[in-house]
Amino acid sequence: MNRILIYILIVFSIGINRLNAQSQSVKITVGTSEFIATLENNPTANAFVQLLPLTINMSELGGVEKYYYFPSGITLPTNASNPGTIQTGDLMLYGNNCLVLFYATFNTSYSYTKIGKIDNVTGLVTALGTGNVIVTYELYNPAMSVNDWEVKNNLVQVSPNPATDYFQISGVEFNQLSLYDMNGKVVNQSKQNTVSTSNIPSGVYFLKIDTKQHETISKKIIVK
């Protein structure tokens, strides 16, 4: 009986550790590029996780950062301090409602609350570009590697793309589709596989797919 109890406790402990590990990592998607960030173990990071998944239009500032002010009424706990040096890939909170993703390393006199840091910043500068950019943050499943995510993403097909009157989704079971313009505004939402684009202006859009496995897949859509 004692051995059985010990075994159950061990299994339970492993499960809790896996949940904790999962809650401490997020996947950051910029266009077709994906990055994994390890979060701080603090109230700010914990509160940030409660907002996920999150797709936002982050503004450019000074060639070193992208920032986003949360809507009125949304604030996160703070414990700000001056880090001295900002590192490429730092994810921080400025004040109590401004999310900042840095893509350069430099000295600073400003104070921030740490949220996390991207593990591998290779390709980050290119992905973020020089202007405003749409970024998706979501919980990361540590059981899946970045390559696994890429394979899964490639299984999802959007056709026709470019689209004229409509496009269709295949290769995934989903709860909802959300189509965003380049300003981060939702222009269409659907729970159907076929999405009409007949009333949508021509341009480049990002499709956010909320899957039944509680994951998010992003695709770039061109509407003619």
Image (cartoon, helix red, strand yellow):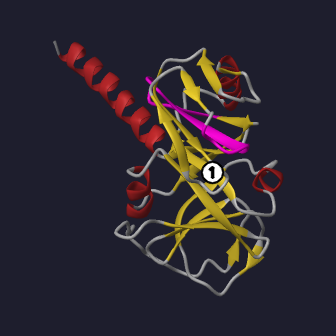
Q: Residue at x 40, y 35 (%)?
A: 19
Q: Residue at x 79, y 71 (%)?
A: 63
Residue 7 lies left or right of residue 219; in this view the side is left
Q: Secondary structure at mark 1?
A: strand
* Quadrant of the drawing holding the C terminus: top right
Q: Nearer the viewer, residue 31 or 215?
A: 31
Residue 69 lies left or right of residue 74; in this view the side is right
Q: Is residue 190 above or below residue 3?
A: below
Report the predominant secondary structure element of the magenta stretch. Answer: strand
The disc labelled 1 sits on which kind of residue? Val
Residue 110 location (% of width, % of height): 61, 84
Q: Nearer the viewer, residue 10 or 156?
A: 156
Residue 18 location (% of width, % of height): 43, 33
Q: Residue at x 67, y 52 (%)?
A: 182
Q: Is residue 143 above or below residue 43?
A: above
* Magenta segment: 199-218
Residue 176 lies left or right of residue 11; in this view the side is right
Q: Nearer the viewer, residue 84 or 47?
A: 47
Label 1 belongs to which residue? 135
